[in-house]
Amino acid sequence: MQAIVAVPVTMGLLLMLLATSIWPPGQVRHTSAPVEAARTPASTASSPASALADAGAATASPLFALPAEEPADSLALDRAKLRFAAGVYIPEMFDPDSADTPPTSFLADFVNPCWRTSDGGLRCLPLVHVLGGYQCAASDLFSRLAMHSDFAPPQHSSPSYYFEQNHKWASYLKTFSRATKSIAEQPARLVTGEGSAGMLSMTWTHSERLHQPYITTMGKRWQICNTNRTRGKDSDANFNACMQAHIATAKADDAALVTRAGAELQVPHLLRATQGTTVRLIALLRNPTNRLYAAFWHYPHYRGKFGASVSGFLKYHREMAGHLSACVQAHGLDACALKFESLERRFERVFYHVDQHFKGVYVPYVRRWSQTFSPGWRTCLLFLRTEDYVANTRDTLARVLSFAGLSAPDEAWWKRTLAEPVRHNGAPRKWSSFPPLPTEARQEVDAFFRPYNEELAALLGDEAFLWAGPSEPPHHLGAVR
């Protein structure tokens, strides 16, 4: 192996070294953003999100009664403790001497979360977050949402601050500086948002900001182990033994951070620490089998290793499903979904750490988001199916607009917005073609995801998330309408 070049180590880079997209109706304007109990609402009228939650209960599948709410995360309910912990993890966010530190409450006459600095300046954070997921049409949804006249777009739609390292808080705020100027002119109407699709699935890689001690320790160790790597048949074994010897130290460094913070945080904790419940969080979830198949063909490294064919896909699926099942048997689903590659060296060495399978096992991530924003998480979170967005884009988008508190568009807006091409990362989608997934292969992958879909449907109280109906058409889902 070539000698390494000294570069800043990110989790994505480190894990790659170690491991040597496609897509509901009221439209009521809200009078104030949802708030923590400490904030005084600008109006006592019920919010549209509350009305939407009531509507959701009324429209849930008759076979799935709306379940009792998930137990609230006790840390999320203690705002002071949560903000302290977040400040230990990311000191720049809660620097008491900085004008950029978000307050515990926002301006009551703004529908978007904003605050005044000591010198009279204005800072705003996004009310709307499209959380993902990948290969689920989240980017397309955000691009159409951003066309609304009540929405002030950010400079960058996917800043990924809360989960990627090396992003600065000041730079994140600047992402909304242009939107902030617009909001200042129409504070009772305009909101802004962002669409970082990696927010939804909190895999280890998509939580790198919260594991800096581990990354730093293992990054340095990789450099030492690689530099001292010998040639010959024992090279890999010696390298792996060298890395294995320091995993315990890296975990201890991470544990020391948790001790200083007084709690172990996940991505939803950071968002709640920053904005309380003044958020509208939206996620599109796609049939996991179809999402996995699309991801296999979208990312060339899977095809490159396993073969660009249906048989290559099945080989990939069977190998990754085996690793995921082995991890779940040893550590449980939640631990594996959140920390797979850090649990054992054997999992760290798995090709791309079963990332695409975990991104389709939605339930542990959906549960974390709902627990962190409980009680009343349905006022903050909206989970939709990609298939419904594709089959009936207008009604689904109308539901999103209402949930976000945006006014009902006129017919001219609908005509213009629905005529836009399908978009990926803000640009027109360039479609690739791939072979249809044969029935037997689909049934095999469906069977793997079925228990997780059943748990998800029970959690959300909606049998639609079983994805038990007809599968989507071959290739991608076609033009969005």
Image (spheres, rainbow, N blue to C red):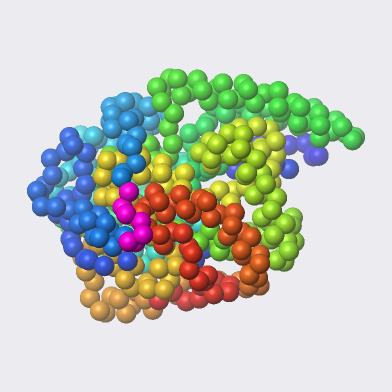
| Residue 373 lies in quadrant | top left
Dividing the image into 4 quarters, which one contains the C terminus? bottom left
Task: Measuring from the top left, give residue 263's x and y in whole percent.
Answer: 41, 26
Residue 445 in view in this figure? yes
Task: Measuring from the top left, give residue 193's x and y in whole percent.
Answer: 33, 54
Of the pair 23 and 127, the residue shown nearer to us: 23
Horizontally, residue 74 falls left or right of residue 166, namely left
Looking at the rendered structure, the number of numbered marks drawn on it comes to 0
Q: Is residue 65 magenta?
A: yes
131 lies above or below 470: above
- Please tell me whether the stretch drawn in magenta is mainly helix, strand or loop: loop
At x 64% / y 29%, what residue is drawn?
218
Task: Measuring from the top left, give residue 453's x and y in whole percent.
Answer: 49, 54
Task: Measuring from the top left, give residue 342's x and y in whole percent.
Answer: 60, 33
Please report the bounds of the magenta region as a residue range: 61-67
Dividing the image into 4 quarters, which one contains the N terminus? top right
At x 22% / y 56%, what residue is drawn?
54
The outermost residue toward the right is 232
At x 26% / y 79%, what residue is drawn?
412
154 lies above or below 171: below
Q: Is residue 354 magenta?
A: no
| Residue 353 lies in quadrant | top right
206 lies above or below 309: above
At x 28% / y 29%, what residue is drawn?
78
Horizontally, residue 308 falls left or right of residue 462, namely right
Of the pair 144 and 334, the residue shown nearer to us: 334
